[in-house]
Image (cartoon, helix red, strand yellow):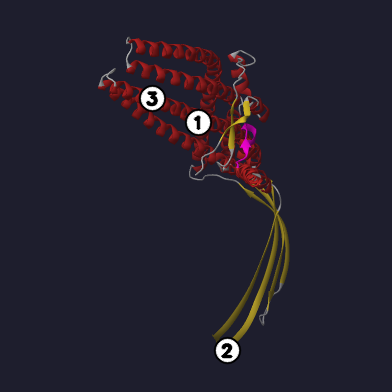
Amino acid sequence: MRRILSALISMILCVTAQAPMAEDLLQIYDQAVVSDPSLREAEQNLFATREVKPQARALLLPNLSASGDVDYRTVDSDSRSSAGSSSFTDDYSTQGLQAVVTQSLFNRANWMTLQRSDNVIAQAEAEYRNFDVDLMARATEAYFDVLRAADLVTVQEALLRATERQLEQSNQRFEVGLVAITDVNESQAAFDRSRADLINAKNTLGNAWEALRVIIGTTSVSLARLGDKLPLAPPEPNEITAWADTAIRSNYGIIAASEAAAAANRVIEIERSGHYPTLDLQAGYDFARSGAQFRTNSDTGFVGLTVNVPIFQGGAVTSRTREAGYNFRAAQDRLDQTRRQVDQQVRDAFRGILSSIEDVKARQASIVSARSALESTQAGLEVGTRTQVDVLDAQRNLFQAEFDYLSARYAYILNGIKLHQATSTLTREVLAKANAWLNPSDLLVPPSY
């Protein structure tokens, strides 16, 4: 007996050790921050964009360059004159070294480029923050998509069991002559349909797990399901215009589009600067040595100003300025489009929360009605006033009502997430509120493959 008990304890410990770790919404998001390749790509793009400013600043700082050369020459000279003829041969080498410092004193395009770099970096910063907010929303949606798909599998499994029992009862009644063969065929058709629906539901669940894996890099974790208690409350403040105004001010997508428009406006001034003169200061030292028989060695120091006044460049500057103007107006249109899209997202999400609250309540009541309808239909079948098809339809309606109720709960949460996403107020603290509604003791086990 003790050996058997010890063996059972060992088996339990092994199973416990191999059981996947449970994760809640916050842990899934933390994994996504580390594992999501698209977020890492956005981060590297931000780092790369930040290098725009030191590159623009370098155009205004002194440039020091040095160049040198070494040549080897062979000279064969043959000359004739009235005094006679002579020939001359010389093999020698020459060396030269030059160091030059150039400082831009006035170049309007360079100053405009430096100012534009601030807008470009601000745009990149806003885009990265917007991407982080988007990751929170994507992780949350993928999390609850898995739970919703798992609920659908549970409902389809229950429906399959119910139709299987109905098929068995139909066969038994047919054998004793209480029903016709059509009832058996209808029960068989309902059973086959339930099997097909279950197969599709399991495939949907597998796809949902894979969508989550794309974000967190693994599916070897169990997910905490949504608890029974879900406080249904409207947004605070419960005023759609207040949320819309907040979104216009703080949405990172709008901020990024605004900075992109400002950067495009700077490009107009950069291209227009092609009509302005430039002034540069140059200072340097030139060192030259020759090994020729009749040589000249020189050491030259120089300081000077270089002025370049553009007069005519074939109309290229004017054309590039017009092009920059068109691009600026396009950026303004994109900004306006972004504002409208964000405003639509805010209003859709706000109305979605309010409708989800009513929908959850209505779905909960529909379950009670569907259950009562099923009981009445089953009683009618017993006395002959209802058919087997009526019972199967009532069963399917009950299970569909249960699934719709669960889906409405998820829709309420996701609409709240989308509202905060549209206003760029989606933070880890907001996720923590949704995370508190999960039941850590009710786990969804990942697929075994």
Circle 2: residue type: Ser
Number of the front mark, 1 or 2? 1
Return the residue at label 1: 150
Dot 2 lies on which element? strand
- In this view, the residue in front, 442 or 201, is 442
**Label located before the other in sequence (1 or 3):** 1
The residue to which callout 3 is attached is: 163
Q: Residues within 10 Å of mark 3 (few under 14, many from 20)?
A: many
**Residue 21 counted in the magenta span:** yes
Q: Residue at x 47, y 28 (%)?
A: 152
Vertical comparison of 201 with 271: above or below = above
Amino acid, disc 3: Thr
Tell me which amino acid carries mark 1.
Answer: Ala
Q: Quadrant of the N terminus?
A: top right
Name the residue located 55 percent from the left edge and 36 percent from the top edge. Answer: 445
Position in image of residue 323 (x %, y %): 49, 37
Q: Position of residue 237 (x, y in %)?
A: 64, 14
Q: Which one is nearer the viewer's eye here, 355 or 307?
A: 355
Front-most of residues 102 and 138:
138
Q: Determine whether the residue tagged by mark 3 lies in a helix, strand or loop.
A: helix
The residues colored magenta run 19-27
Give the CA separation, mark 1 to mark 2. 105 Å
- Tell me the CA gap for discs 2 and 3: 121 Å
Dot 1 or dot 2, earlier in sequence: 2
Label 1: which secondary element? helix
**Which numbered marker is on residue 86?**
2
The residue under the point 28% across, 23% down is 175
Q: Where is residue 334 drawn, in percent x and y?
A: 51, 29
- Distance from the alpha carbon under mark 1 to that under mark 3: 20 Å
Marks 1 and 2 close (CB-CB < 8 Å): no
Label 1 Cα neighbours within 10 Å, binned few <14 / some 14-19 / many ≥20: many
